[in-house]
Image (spheres, rainbow, N blue to C red):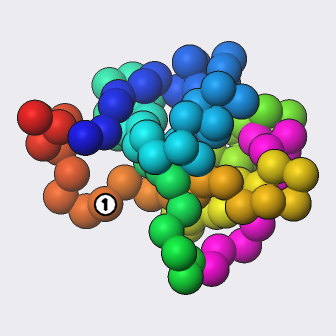
Amino acid sequence: MEQVINSANLRRHPGECIARASKGETFVVLRYGRAIAMLRPRSSGEAYEPLRATDLWRDFPRVLARARREAVLITWYSEAVAVLGPVPKGWRRGDES
């Protein structure tokens, strides 16, 4: 089940959210009440362009805009830990139950 988080909370606590995603949690990122991205654990075999976790909080708006178009692999000390990417087509907030 996905947890809903607003983009401001992700921006304030990116390390905590990335750590939780690396342990199996999935977050749907909302902006003004609309789902704009999904932060989730990495599945085996996925290959995306890597992005350092520090870049996420250093240039949050640019990274979030990029993740809305294509998934990026968040790395922490060169280890792939989570994926930030577009919300799957057809996802609706009511789908979380």
Give the magenta-colored segment's residue range. 47-56
Please identify the quarter of the rendering in which residue 87 is found.
bottom left
Please identify the quarter of the rendering in which residue 49 is found.
bottom right
Work out whether residue 36 or residue 71 is closer to the camera in this orientation and state it. Answer: 71
Q: Quadrant of the C terminus?
A: top left
Residue under circle 1? Answer: 88
Work out whether residue 33 or residue 9 is closer to the camera in this orientation and state it. Answer: 9
Residue 84 spot, x, y in % from top left: 56, 53
| In the rendered image, the vertical position of residue 56 relative to residue 74, given as above or below | above
**How many marks do you count on the picture?**
1
Work out whether residue 43 or residue 49 is closer to the camera in this orientation and state it. Answer: 43
Asked whether, in this view, residue 71 is left or right of residue 94, the answer is right
Please identify the quarter of the rendering in which residue 11 is found.
top right
Is 26 inside the magenta-drawn segment? no
Q: Quadrant of the N terminus?
A: top left
- Residue found at the far front of this picture: 23
Residue 32 spot, x, y in % from top left: 39, 23
Is 54 inside the magenta-drawn segment? yes
Q: Residue at x 49, y 68 (%)?
A: 43
Q: Residue at x 21, y 51 (%)?
A: 91
